[in-house]
Amino acid sequence: MASLAEATLQGRRRAVTLDFLEKIYASSGITKRHSVLADYTKDSPADFEFYPPNWALEPFPTTATRMKVYEEWSVDLAEAACRKALRESGAKPAEITHLIFTTCTGLFAPGPDILLIGRLGLGSQVHRAVLGFMGCYAGFSGLRMAGQILGAETEAVVLQVCVELCSLHFQKRALPDFIVANSLFADGAAAAVYARPGRFKVGLADLVATHSRVENDSLEHMSWRIGPSGFEMRLDREVPARLKSAASGFVGELFDRAGLKCGGSAWAIHPGGRKIVEEVQSSLGLTDSQVRSSFEVLSSCGNMSSGTIFFVLDKELRRASQGTVAALGFGPGLTMEGAIFSRP
């Protein structure tokens, strides 16, 4: 009887977990995501290439194994994103004076920033900076750094690239934090070129102002730590509500820095998840059309951590030819980031 009771209890636990999984994925707002791992498209574990050929996924891949895949793929994706940005901006590789590389899903040295020098044909004396392990808001840190560089060096041309391979860090333990993270995050890369106005004929927008703030008493609301089997994400269920309560005041500070009024601005909100966008939308009183780009990127790409905001910005900056675009991002801290762009 004891063994039968144990089996029944385990069966109930599995049923509850599957029910929770179905609800989380159904409510994510995501219809498609991308990964460098082909295993996620396989019907049978016998066809797995990264995970062990069994549904238990044992022995579960170690962090070292995941970092090997990161090293194999990250530079390829970064190169493709950079080449597209260079082509669309009209900048030549030899003109790049600074390279900013952003990632929170892998590391190795000599790193991808160095390898990109040869891949792209950049000058060997290009100034490099790697912004690592900051999370979803790091794209803003990179664009702020680019703005600061241009403010100090008038002839500078800055190339920024964000590469995130979030799908490498799938966690199989049925913990709510891991299940939510598994349902949201995806792989992707984005790049941008920055220069003083008039340097190149093609330009989507001018950076007007940036702002950053860490919310008080919120350090454990979102965290990202290295574990023995990949990086582990912790997400407190209170994150959307916390951002909702803080968004309005933060946005006011951002527009004050720009010397502008927020009325009439277009918006690019980092789609950390469907609930996050909805709560920020509610806090700021935005219409569905004003957050359309955020939901479109979430639906077609998922959350690609630091690079995601550039996918949203690209859509929003191309939608209208004039006016300002306010961008917002969020990450561990809780950190709130903002930037305002003016379309020429």
Image (tube, grey):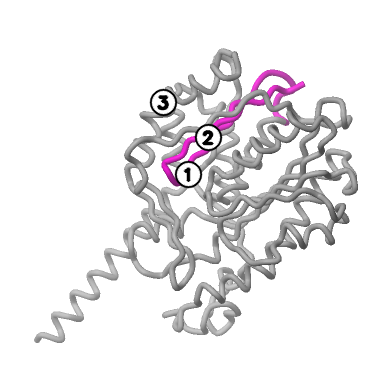
Q: To which quarter of the image does residue 234 belong?
A: bottom left
| Main SS, magenta residues | strand
Please give the name of the residue rendered at 66% of the width and 50% of the height, measured from the top-left corner: 162
Q: Residues within 10 Å of mark 1 (few under 14, many from 20)?
A: many
Q: Is residue 46 left or right of residue 249?
A: right
Please give the name of the residue rendered at 56% of the width and 27% of the height, measured from the top-left corner: 289
Precedes in sequence: disc 2 or disc 1: 1
Vertical order, 158 against 248 (above or below): below
The quarter of the picture where the N terminus appears is bottom left
**SS of the residue at dot 3?**
helix
Q: Which residue is mark 1?
A: 331
User: In the image, which residues are magenta?
Assistant: 318-344
Precedes in sequence: disc 3 or disc 1: 3
Precedes in sequence: disc 3 or disc 2: 3
Judging depth in this view, the residue of 28 and 281 nearest the camera is: 281
Which of the numbered marks, if any, corresponds to residue 283?
A: 3
Evaluate if marks 2 and 1 touch, with contact meaning CB atoms under 8 Å apart.
Answer: yes
Q: Is residue 9 left or right of residue 104?
A: left
Judging depth in this view, the residue of 70 and 107 nearest the camera is: 107
Judging depth in this view, the residue of 243 and 158 nearest the camera is: 158
Q: Residue 245 placed where, x, y %?
A: 36, 29
Q: Is residue 163 left or right of residue 253?
A: right
The residue under label 1 is which amino acid type?
Answer: Gly
The residue under label 3 is which amino acid type?
Answer: Ser
Q: Is residue 177 left or right of residue 281?
A: left
Q: Residue 14 placed where, x, y %?
A: 29, 70
Query: Gap in Å between the C-alphas at discs 2 and 1?
Result: 9 Å
Q: Which residue is mark 2?
A: 337
Magenta stretch containing residue 334, yes or no?
A: yes
